[in-house]
């Protein structure tokens, strides 16, 4: 690592700490030549994950958008926030582990609904009604029947 002051390459690490929940390391360094101290950060380089929307528009994956949708679906339900964070993290991890750079938004919605159905049925129905844009009560009833059949299986 070159010193930002004198540009010598002989620097030593004085202190290292994990940051960002262990996803990165902060290092304090000192130049052996001029004794200038500086900080560097080291983190895993993640490939950008692109979401392909229904209309073909592409945007960068946002864990926060998933979390917002989960929070809205679970409003006034006995689901702890930590559980919603776990769901959002597990979906992101699953998508990144697939090793592909683009994923359809439909797949993400299905992952959310799959996990919500195991946590809270009411939140699942709320999310599904918005996500699948139920046009009438019959479609809504069909979704409820599917949920009941999954429960019995």
Image (cartoon, grey):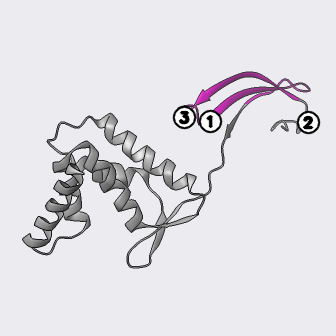
> Per the image, is 153 magenta?
no
Tell me, for residue 6, which label it has, or none: none
Q: Which residue is mark 2?
A: 8
Residue 13 in the image: x percent, y percent?
79, 24
Residue 24 in the image: x percent, y percent?
62, 36
Q: Around disc 2, counting alpha carbons within 10 Å, would you say few (fewer than 14), some (14 to 19), or many (20 or more)?
A: some
The residue lying toward the viewer, choosing from 101 and 118, is 118
Q: Around disc 3, counting alpha carbons within 10 Å, would you say few (fewer than 14), some (14 to 19), or many (20 or more)?
A: few
Q: Looking at the image, which residue is at 29% across and 36% down?
A: 81
- In the image, residue 102 sits, relative to residue 5, either above or below, namely below
Q: Quadrant of residue 104?
A: bottom left
Residue at the outermost top position: 14
Do the residues bearing badges 1 and 3 touch, measured as CB atoms within 8 Å? Answer: yes
The residue lying toward the viewer, choosing from 130 and 6, is 130
Q: Main secondary structure of the magenta part?
A: strand
Residue at the outermost left position: 137
Q: Secondary structure at mark 1?
A: strand
Q: Looking at the image, which residue is at 56% across and 57% down?
A: 98
- In the image, residue 140 sits, relative to residue 33, either above or below, namely below
Image check: 78 left or right of 16? left
Mark 1 or 2: the one toward you: 1
Q: Which residue is mark 3?
A: 20
The residue lying toward the viewer, choosing from 10 and 87, is 87
Q: Quadrant of residue 119?
A: top left
Residue 57 in the image: x percent, y percent?
44, 75
> Per the image, is 12 magenta?
yes
Say whether disc 2 or disc 3 marks the residue closer to the N-terminus. 2
- What is the quadrant of the N terminus in the image? top right
Q: Which residue is mark 1?
A: 24
Residue 53 in the image: x percent, y percent?
41, 72
First to last magenta residue range: 11-38
């Amino acid at each position: 690592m070159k010193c930002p002051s004198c540009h010598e390459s002989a620097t030593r690490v004085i202190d290292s700490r994990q940051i960002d929940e262990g996803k990165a390391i902060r290092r304090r360094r000192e130049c052996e030549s001029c004794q200038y101290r500086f900080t560097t950060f080291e983190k895993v380089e993640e490939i950008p994950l692109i979401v392909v929307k229904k209309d073909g528009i592409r945007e960068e994956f946002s864990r926060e958008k998933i979390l917002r949708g989960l929070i809205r679906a679970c409003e006034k339900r006995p689901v702890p926030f930590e559980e919603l964070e776990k769901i959002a993290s597990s979906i992101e991890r699953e998508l990144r582990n697939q090793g592909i750079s683009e994923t359809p938004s439909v797949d993400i919605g299905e992952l959310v609904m799959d996990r919500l159905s195991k946590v809270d049925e009411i939140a699942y129905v709320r999310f599904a009604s918005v996500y699948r844009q139920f046009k009438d009560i019959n479609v809504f009833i069909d979704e409820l029947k599917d949920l009941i059949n999954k429960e019995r299986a």
